[in-house]
Image (cartoon, rainbow, N blue to C red):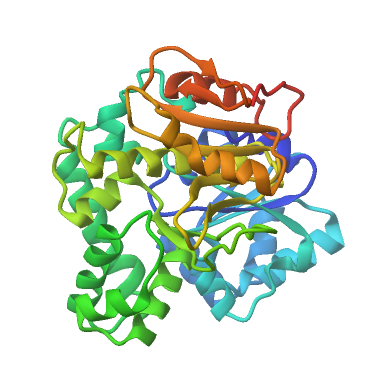
Amino acid sequence: MLDLPTLAQKKSLFLFGPRSTGKTTLLRAQFPAERIINLLRSGIAIPLSHNPGELRELINAMPDSDLPVVIDEIQKIPALLDEVHDLIEERGLRFILTGSSARKLRRGGVNLLAGRAWQCNLFPLCSAELSQFDLNRYLLYGGLPQVVDSEDPLEELDAYINTYLTEEIMAESLVQNLVHFSAFLRVAALSNSQQINFANVSRDTGVPASSVRAWFKILNDNFTGFMLDPWHSPGRKAVATAKFYFFDTGVANFLAGYRSLNRNSAEFGAAFEHFIAMELRAWLAYGRHKETLQYWRTRDGLEVDFIVGKRLAVEVKAANRIHPGDLKGLRALGEEAEFAKRVVVSMEELPRTTSDGIQILPWQQFLHELWRTEPAGGSGTNQL
């Protein structure tokens, strides 16, 4: 759903995303190999790290083309961004620069090209990218490409998490104690999709709250998780604490120790909410929609799971039948501000609309209507 060639016709791009979400595979599918410089290859990375100016020589040797130059894993050599900056200004070249750690780039003292490149994000495979979509499997195992296709998804998740911990976290010296950090990851996964309580996580892990705060920031900076900020209502007093989600349902479940999801369990409902969060986040990013994704919760317990600008308010219920009590949050939110659509995403089989305009949709229909908007800011129409 991410159309990089169309976007790259307009400007240089940063393509950020967690490891193994398919950045390199996508680039190889959309651009010729002679335009790609892969910094994971030591024969390329070592000379460039010693002399970043050699980038010009590599580009000079490329066949003439109006296509962008792709530099894969740019965070490996942040100094290359100075050369890229100069080549954009001097020769009008366009680049696609991929990375799995914005933190490392910032620590390198670079300015991310000072607005000369747009940012794109790549996430795990979403429902619209899977021809055979199995909700139960996705909720449990997630959307990492190597997991989706695997006959042994648990082994793939285990390998991914161990590789990530050793290569991404320890290799960058972001965490000195892997045992404590592993305990933190488990507690963070158990509280996935909930409001962050640093004191509680600190108590459960035996790690100082200051370290807990820093580690949540590491997960955010390395695209392993994301914060959902609260929407501040004009009337009712709303909470001010963000919620945290891991970037993938499968990763969250594996870290939490969930090896199955009972259809009627709280864990299934939390995974279903997490899945819709992933879909909304990908839809906003791939379609270049500029609304923010937030949630709303009042101090007296009224809540709406997701708010997309003034366009959409979404409550997620893994229930076969939605009752009036399930609509309290959306109705209260409607008293605070006007939204184009208020929707309950559910397990009901048929869509219906209440007398006050709340749509109760089967999850399949919600996702179908959501993804009807063409990616990359296309001219398609959206029904939500």
Horizontal arrangement in the rendering, residue 342 relative to residue 173 (left or right): right
Asked whether residue 34 appears in the rendered view, the answer is: no
Residue situated in front as seen by the camera: 6 or 279: 279
List x then y, in percent, for residue 294.
57, 53
* Image quadrant occupied by the N terminus: top right
Horizontal arrangement in the rendering, residue 319 relative to residue 178 (left or right): right
List x then y, in percent, for residue 339.
69, 38
Residue situated in front as seen by the camera: 240 or 203: 240
List x then y, in percent, for residue 36.
57, 47
Residue situated in front as seen by the camera: 382 or 36: 382
List x then y, in percent, for residue 365.
49, 18
Quarter holding residue 205? bottom left
Residue at point 47%, 59% (across, down): 300
Asked whether residue 84 appears in the rendered view, the answer is: yes
Residue at point 43%, 54% (across, down): 18
Quarter holding residue 111? bottom right
Residue at point 63%, 37% (across, down): 312
Horizontal arrangement in the rendering, residue 286 relative to residue 179 (left or right): right
* Image quadrant occupied by the C terminus: top right
- Relative to 203, does residue 359 appear above or below in the rendering? above
